[in-house]
Amino acid sequence: MTDRKTELARNLAKVEERIAAACAAAGRKREEVTLIVVTKTYPASDVRMLSELGVRHVAENRDQDAAPKAAACSDLSLNWHFVGQLQTNKVRSVVGYADVVQSVDRSRLVTALSNEAERAGREVGCLIQVALDAGAAGRGERGGVAPGGIEELADLVARAPGLRLDGLMTVAPLTGEYAGRQQAAFERLMDLSTDLRRIHPAANMVSAGMSADLEEAVAAGATHVRVGTAVLGVRPSLG
């Protein structure tokens, strides 16, 4: 085993211990929480090693990095999640490899995703990204739709050919009433998920929590956690 693969295996084991402990503390079964490893800025060789170590879900946030990486790893049994803010001019490329787009936050994006999924003959899972720091414009600093906009957008996704409404996603906000209150933010997301599932029962995926706050997300009830740094290490500066 290479030094890098040994490092990844060790880090994965530590994250697994954290998730298992958080599940136990919350009275949840470990299999209720899926780990998504965020591989942004890291090479395809790391993705390949992660696959060999048992990882099945990986996430990217920039198409220009993700597309060639996904192509290089197309022989692997992986589920690719797109978690970054997505411009409509990148939708065709993203639909080519992403199994789930976690950052759906506007109707124009739903239309573009539907058109490209239909063209490609694919079904793409969609999560509504919820901005718990949404201001007067109804959007958050890092994208997302205000809680009041979830129902309309979810209905649009549910009706769109080629798309599947899977649930909700959020990023713990840095400003507003939930700043520094990750668990409260994730509990609010769970309440919104409960509301959504009354209308769309199958939309039961809740993606929340990252390296620093996965325990709070698990305690709140998240079904998926997105972990990058704790598995892959501190990312190099992008400039």
Image (spheres, grey):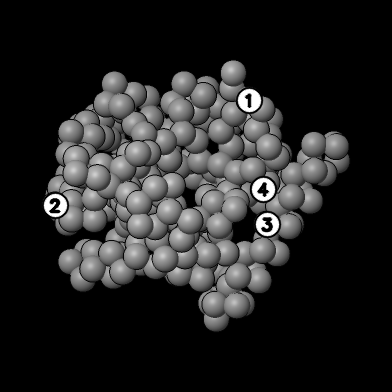
Residue that label 2 marks: 152
Residue at 51% of width from left, 41% of height from top?
59
Q: Please name whichever residue, 74 or 140, is drawn nearer the observer in this view of the structure.
A: 140
Q: Earlier in the sequence, mark 4 or mark 1?
A: 4
Q: Which amino acid does label 2 sit on?
A: Glu
Q: Can residue 186 be seen in this view?
A: no
Locate residue 167: give its quadrant. Answer: bottom left
Residue mark closest to the camera, 3 vs 1: 1
Apparent side of residue 218 relative to residue 186 in the rendered image (left or right): right
Residue that label 3 marks: 15
Q: Please name whichever residue, 16 or 135, is drawn nearer the observer in this view of the structure.
A: 135
Residue mark closest to the camera, 2 vs 1: 1
What separation in Å lies between label 4 and label 3 (alpha carbons)? 7 Å
Badge 4 element: helix
Residue that label 4 marks: 230
Q: Earlier in the sequence, mark 2 or mark 3?
A: 3
Mark 4 in CB contact with mark 1 (< 8 angstroms): no
Q: In which quarter of the image is the C terminus?
A: top right
Mark 4 in CB contact with mark 3 (< 8 angstroms): yes
Above/below status of 96 relative to 14? above
